[in-house]
Image (tube, helix red, strand yellow):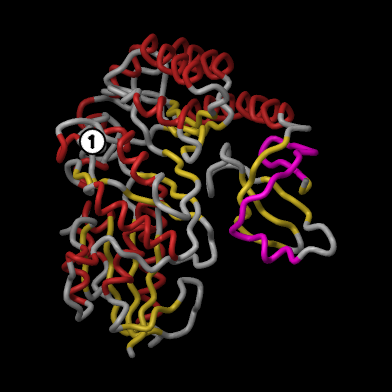
Amino acid sequence: MKTLRVITLGCSKNTVDTEHLLYQVRDSYEIVPEDDPCPVDVEAINTCGFIGDAKEQSIQVILEAAQKKKDGLVGRLLVFGCLSQRYPTELPDLIPEVDGWFGARELDSLVTALGCRPSPESAQKRILTSPGRPYAFFKISEGCNRRCSYCAIPFIRGPHKSVPIETLVAEARELAAQGIRELVIIAQDTTYYGLDIYGKRCLAQLLRELSKVEGIEWLRIHYSYPADFPEDVLDEMASNPKVCRYMDIPLQHISDGVLAAMHRGVDGAWTRALIGRMRERVPGVVLRTTMIVGHPGEGTREFNELLKFVKEARFPRLGAFTYSEEEGTYGAENLRDSVRPSTKKKRLDALMEAQRGISLAYNQSRIGTEEKVLADSLQDGVLVCRSEFESPEVDGEILVKAPSGIDAASLVGTFFNVRITGADEYDLIAEII
C-alpha cells in the first residue's frame, strides 16, 4: 500500500476533518502518524487561514513539505483546508511544488485526488488521530451565518449547515465503541444548530439524544454564541448528568460601542443578563470565554470597561487576543485599525494579568473538594486528568500521582474520584480517594 501522512494545523474542527478524510481513504493507504518523519508517498497538509499567525504557520509548513519533496522524502504534496479555500488563485503561483490545492469545502475532491471514491454513507466515520485518548471533538455543523466584523470564517467555510441528529448519534455510537467517553461538541456556532434543517434551534434535543448513547458519559459544549442563545440548553445542563456544567461562550467584549462595531448582535446589558441567568439556572457552571482587545472603536474608556467587567464577572477560564485586520472582512474594508500594536499588547497584558489572579483564586477555592475526574493519559507516573470543569487542550489539568500497588495505566480512560490538594493558576494537584 502507498503511505499517506496528514499534517493538521489550526483548530479542533480541522482535526475532525482530517479524521473523516482518513476513514475515506483507509483501504488504499497506510496511514503514517503526523509526527513520524519517514518518507511517504503522499503528504497532505490541512491548513488554517483564520488570522495572520495561523496563515504564516501554514505557509511555513507547506514550504518545509515542498523542500522534503525536493529531497525525495515526499512523493505527492497536497494542501487543503482554510488557507487554500481563502487564497485559491494566489497560492499555486507562490508554491508550485504543491501538486494539488483543495478548499475547506472540497473534501470529496481531495478524496478523489487520492485515488479513492467519496462515500456519502461513511462521510461521518472517522479514524482517530490520537488513539487511546478518551475524548473526541465532535463537529455538529459546518459554516456560519454570522457576520462578525473581524471574522473570515463565513466566507471560508460557507453558510451554516447542520448534520442531522440521527447521523450524529450514529457517529457517537462508533466513537463510544472505540473507547471515547467524552464528546467535546464543536462548530462555528453550536447554538445555531438545527435552524437550517429543523426550523428551530435543536442543541438541547441533540444533547438529550447523545446522552442516550451507551459509553458516552460527558458532553461538553464549545463555541456558543451569545445572541439568541437557546436557554433550553441550560435546562438540559442543569438536569442531565451527562452534560458537563461547562460552557464555552466567546463574548469578545462588553462595551456597547465595540460590540456594535463587531456586529455581535448584543449589547453589554444583554451580555451581563445572560451570564447571570446561566449562573442562576446552572449552579456551579464554569464559563469559558474569549475577548478581543484593540478592535476599531476601542479607546481607553472602552478597554477599561472591559477590564472592569472581567474583574467583576470572574470567569474561571478566559483567553484573549489582539485584533488583527483580515482582508475580506467587514472590519478590514470599512473600519480603520486605529489602535497601535504597542497599545494592543499593553491592553492584552493587563487583561491577562487580571485573569491570572482570577484563575488562581478559582483553583484555590477547590482545594479540599472531592471531584469526579477522567484520566486522559499517564505521564512519568502521573495521571493527567480533568473534571467536568476542565476542557481538553485549552484548560488546565488535574495531576494525580499514581499510588503504589495500582496499575496506573489501567486507569487511563476511566472515571474515578479524587480530592484536590493543591492549585496554581492553571493546574490542580489531587489524590485518589
Whether residue 232 is visible here, answered yes or no, is: yes
Q: Residue at x 23, y 63 (%)?
A: 123
Q: Residue at x 23, y 61 (%)?
A: 91
Query: Is 213 or 85 nearer to us in this picture?
Result: 213
* Percent of width and height locating residue 76: 29, 81
Q: Residues within 10 Å of mark 1 (few under 14, many from 20)?
A: some
Q: Is residue 416 magenta?
A: yes
Instruction: Please give the count of numbered marks on the rendered protein.
Output: 1
Q: Is residue 376 left or right of residue 195?
A: right
* Percent of width and height locating residue 229: 32, 24
Whether residue 70 is visible here, answered yes or no, is: no
Please identify the quarter of the rendering in which residue 335 is found.
Answer: top left
- Three-letter code for the amino acid on which mark 1 is drawn: Thr
* Percent of width and height locating residue 15: 39, 58
Magenta residues (range): 407-430
In terms of secondary structure, where does tag 1 sit? loop
Q: Residue at x 57, y 37 (%)?
A: 389
* Percent of width and height locating residue 329: 23, 35
Q: Is residue 185 left or right of residue 345?
A: left
Q: Is residue 350 left or right of residue 19?
A: right
Q: Residue at x 26, y 41 (%)?
A: 152
Above or below: residue 349 compared with residue 429: above
Q: Is residue 190 magenta?
A: no
Label 1 sits on residue: 329
Above or below: residue 392 compared with residue 120: above
User: Given the current orientation, which residue lies at the most extreme right position?
Assistant: 404
Q: Is residue 401 left or right of residue 24?
A: right
Please identify the quarter of the rendering in which residue 191 is found.
Answer: top left
Query: Is 202 or 38 nearer to us in this picture?
Result: 202
